[in-house]
């Protein structure tokens, strides 16, 4: 693990209660609980960013698919006879 640093931040009473119940959730301490939460958030944010990129690319390709005659060949593959 990389070196750890301390940060100061504010949380509300509900979040305080959650942190104080760290043992119930299987964590060794409050810090490990916060680190795990941040890791999960980081992963979710990365996944969402990747999904957004993929959706943008799909929209771009749909536009090309609808206007480029070379792509119309694939329309036949989408017909029910091939499903």
Image (cartoon, rainbow, N blue to C red):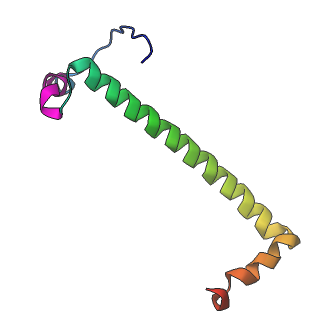
Q: Relative to 2, is 7 on the left or the right?
A: left
The residue drawn where x is 35% and y is 8% is: 6
Measured along the vertical axis of the image, is residue 50 above or below residue 59?
above
Residue 82 in picture, x, y percent from top left? 66, 87
Does residue 68 lie above or below 49 as drawn? below
Res 19 → quadrant: top left
Q: Quadrant of residue 64?
A: bottom right
22 relative to 37 in the view: left or right = left
Residue at 55% of width from left, 41% of height from top?
A: 49
Q: Main secondary structure of the magenta part?
A: helix
Between 66 and 7, which is closer to the camera in this rendering?
Answer: 7
Q: Position of residue 9 (x, y in %)?
A: 32, 13
- Report whether 43 appears left or right of 20: right
Q: Magenta part of the protein: which range? A: 16-25
Task: Return the residue found at the far front.
Answer: 1
Q: Quadrant of the N terminus?
A: top left
Q: Residue at x 62, y 51 (%)?
A: 54
Residue located farthest toward the bottom when viewing the structure as drawn: 81
Quadrant location of the C terminus?
A: bottom right
**Image spot of residue 36 (x, y percent):** 33, 29
Q: Nearer the viewer, residue 32 or 13?
A: 32
Q: How many labels sit on residues?
A: 0
Magenta stretch: includes residue 32: no
In depth, the one of 29 and 19 nearer the eye is: 29
In the figure, 60 relative to 41: above or below? below
**Residue at x-position 39% and y-position 11%:** 4
């Amino acid at each position: 693990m990389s070196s750890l640093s301390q940060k100061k931040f504010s949380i509300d009473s509900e979040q305080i209660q959650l942190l104080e119940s760290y043992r119930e959730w299987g964590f060794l301490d409050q810090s490990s609980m916060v680190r795990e939460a941040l890791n999960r958030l980081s992963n979710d944010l990365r996944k969402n960013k990747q999904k957004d990129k993929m959706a943008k690319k799909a929209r771009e390709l749909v536009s090309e698919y609808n206007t480029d005659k070379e792509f119309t060949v694939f329309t036949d593959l989408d017909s029910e006879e091939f499903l």
